[in-house]
Amino acid sequence: MPRRDLADVIDHFVALVLGHLDREFPHKLDHVINDASEILGPRALHPIFYGSFDWHSSVHGHWLLIRAIRLFPALAQADQVRGILDARFTSDNVRGEVAYLGQKLRTTFERPYGWGWFLKLAAELRSPPPTGVTLSEATAAAFARWHAALQPLTDAFVERFVNFLPKATYPIRVGTHHNTAFALALAHDYARLTEHAALGDAISKSARAWYLNDRDYPAWEPDGIDFLSPGLVEAECMRRVLPPAEFAPWFARFLPALAERKPATLFVPATVSDRTDGQITHLDGLNLCRAWCWRSLASTLEPNDPRHSLMIQSAKDHLEAALPHVSGDYMGEHWLATFAMLAMSE
């Protein structure tokens, strides 16, 4: 498949998300039922994030739409996106999402993956456009409205992070939703952009306590249901948390044989045998996650560093392995465009 720029596929990514935001079923609920009155469907439980198979996929689908109209002011679907999000991001709907979090036994709802993605969405509304891009007046005004409307929900997830991280003694290193490094990396964007001292401090302390002494990553991946690379998302988390002068020696210790293409498994795109299987198709997401991490981590190196070209080539190889499969079966289609967006725009 020829290598493509994001501009070549952004209309397709947006169309995929728009096709899923109102699709309530099939749906995989993360829902503790306290009594019979809480036996409800996704739309009744989550007035904003009820589509796209599960709550967190809906959240990062909304993030993709916001990012799309920030990066591409002339996007063909921009008016449609603004209209849909105006109807979603209302005070009443936000109160409904916040009220859900406040019920008994909901403290761990979507921890930490959904928490990180929601703060990534909130950060997107505060992010400046790229150099040379000017937001339309309609989009700039919409971002201000949505930021204000979502603030109570944003505050709820910030509070959850700040309360949880000091008591989280150990990291979670799996390649699926419970991975702590990925969630910290996403939440760090919000802490940095808003200069939220308590959140930023909690993230920094946890990342340092969990990962600072790691070295010579063994790369026991992929597992059969990974959509995150445990090693590369850890490195991406530390890239964001550590100052550059501290990150460079940490990264050299973490992947000491990188210039020799070791660990070899990190350079080989995962094989996906059945894209109708919702767990196996996670591996397309793993390939996109690695593409994102390799490209981002390569940005910390000088172009003449022998590791740089290897990392850039691996990012391309992983992207090309997965990009043709962003659409097709709903098990991947409801979320893979989000990871492609990360891989192609960060």
Image (spheres, helix red, strand yellow):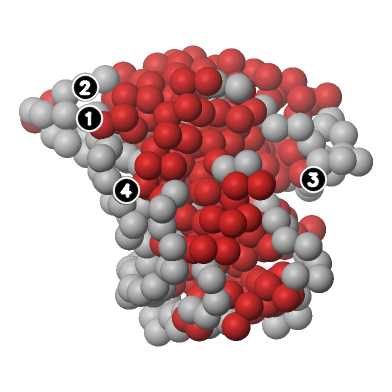
Quarter where residue 31 is shown: top left
Residue to which mark 2 is pinned: 103
State the SS at label 3.
loop
Q: State if disc 1 and disc 4 touch (CB < 8 Å).
A: no
Number of other residues with Cα within 10 Å of mark 2, as a class: few under 14, some 14 to 19, many 20 or more: few
Between the residue at mark 4 and the residue at mark 3, the CA separation in whole angstroms equals 37 Å
Estimate the spatial distance between the alpha carbons at disc 2 and disc 3, rounded to whole Å.
Answer: 39 Å
Q: Earlier in the sequence, mark 3 or mark 1?
A: 3
Q: Considering the image in quadrants, where does the N terminus appear?
A: bottom right
**Numbered disc 1: secondary structure:** loop
Residue 72's label in the rendered image is 3
Residues under numbered marks 2 and 1 in contact, where contact means CB atoms less than 8 Å apart: yes
Looking at the image, can residue 267 be seen? no
Q: Secondary structure at mark 4?
A: loop
Extreme-left residue of the structure: 35
Q: Which mark is residue 171?
A: 4
The three-letter amino acid code for the residue at tag 4 is Pro
Q: Secondary structure at mark 2?
A: loop
Which residue is at 27% across, 37% downward? 168
Look at discs 4 and 3 and give the one toward the viewer.
Answer: 4
Q: CA distance from mark 3 to mark 1?
A: 37 Å
Q: Nearer the viewer, mark 4 or mark 2?
A: 4
| Kind of residue at badge 1 | Arg
